[in-house]
Image: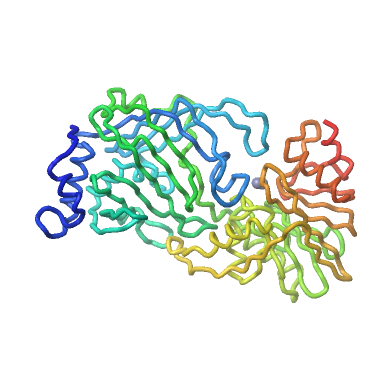
Amino acid sequence: MFRTLTMSAVCAALLSAGCGGGPRDAQAVLADVNEAMATEGLQSITYSGTAQTLDRAFLQTAVASPPWPMYDISNYSRTIDLTAPASRATGTMFHGGVFLRPPTEQPYEQQINADETAWNNQLEIWLTPWGFLRGAEMYGAEVGTAEMGEAAFTTLTWQSPESQTSPSGMRYTVTGYINDQNLVSRVETQVEHVMMGDLQVAANYSDYREMDGVMVPASMEQERAGGTSFTVAVESATANPADLTARLTPPPAEGNGGGGGGGGGRGGGPAPDPADLVRKVYDGVYLVGGGYEAMIVEFTDFVVVFEGGAQNENRGQQVLAATRATVPNKPIRYVVNSHFHSDHSSGLAAWAREGITILTHEENVPFAEMALSNPRTLLGEPTMDPTIEGVEDVMVIEDAMNRMEIVHIPNPHAEHLLGVYLPRHSHFHQADLTLFPDDPSPAHIAFAERVRELGMEFDTLTGVHPAPNPESDDDVLVALQQ
Ligand SMILES: [Zn+2]
Ligand SMILES: [Zn+2]
């Protein structure tokens, strides 16, 4: 299948000029690429090596903006059936999860079945060099040119079938960059995301080597929103593995979906009256139940809502409606976002769309601006123009009615996490710092250190994740004794 330098590869050095002098059409480009990549007869492929994936997951990392921390996957092996298409990857990884427990060995698994239709998962196949070429043959590609840095590329662009569209009804677009050796250097597409709008997912391929007669990129890198989210160093590959079915079949009672990075949901189920979800805690202070618990703090001339943008679009709208029902006739000055993790930020669009200023830690502002300003064509929504302001250390909002301190709690779960301290009510409301008193994690210990450092005193601790909490700062400070 493999030849080092073909006539068409020489012609391709002239890029789209081709050998005949005119621009190559898509079929000619595809033929040249398939020849250079030695894909003739390739129906499936297994490749193995070592991989790296995001520490935790996309939008669950310790910092918002890339580069994001990664952890290793050993014994990584992936098999792709290009005809189904279907894919299964396995490996072994060590990690401690979002609460930073001591790392334990855990299986890595990514399963994409032949009946998978969600673009967010299926794109994992189309972004591979071979999936991309198969899609270009099936769905009809258009040829173009592009430059990246110093290099010029021929591009092939194709769209998902009419039956596979985004919420707006648009088909998904896939673009591959073909280098001057007729090898696939990069493939990119976009998928809808409730916070990030048209989220770009791309894969870069380099260091092509012949493996089992096929040209395989020894270096694979996937990016989401411009940051590296997965890498593979390929050591070996097998074309058309004989045990294909076994390689694609998960063991019994397993089968976690793969894909990573969710599009976020819009929630579901019958909607309760938002006003019924609100319970008064003190004069001018309310908690909004029915999901991640938001806190409404009322001032003489305005209100501030902490964590009104969590979970999903529906929840964001629900907390917004609950706020307006509870405190009518006062403008909402800020919705505070505790941190950028997807489950705490996927409802922010509901507030941004209303022109309400989002307050988050200043280190999270650039990422939030990028995310919420992205085009939202795949969702069928207009581009937003969000107003986002940053909190540096402690921001005090105070008048005769209330005093609210928005406090930065640096900790390894999310380095730039905000909580709410209400000194007049001896109350603290936190996100993702719900305590396990007998077994404090590094994040809880960091919280306790901050409580001691700022001398915050409270009799009541509540959580965005409702859970039985210890009642006072003394209970939090116990973490420092362990
Ligand atoms: Zn979190
Ligand atoms: Zn959380």
Q: Is residue 466 above or below residue 24?
A: above
Residue ID at (48%, 27%)? 74
Quadrant of residue 313 in the image? bottom right
Tell me residue 203's x, y (percent).
39, 46
Q: Residue at x 54, y 53 (%)?
A: 265
The location of residue 464, given as percent across then percent down, is 72, 50
- Give left or right: position of 482 versus 360: right
Hey, which residue is sitting farthest left in the picture? 20
- On the image, the x and y values in percent for residue 400 come to 89, 71
| Quadrant position of the C terminus in the picture | top right
* Quadrant of the drawing holding the N terminus: top left
**Residue 414 horizontal side relative to residue 176, left or right:** right
Q: Is residue 356 above or below residue 236?
A: below
Q: Considering only vertical position in the picture, is 304 above or below 444?
A: below
- Name the foreground residue: 387 vs 70: 70
Residues 41 and 66: in front is 66
Compare residues 289 and 196 and report the one nearer the observer.
Answer: 196
Residue found at the far front of this picture: 150
Front residue of 168/1: it is 1
Residue 447 placement (x, y as % from top left): 78, 44
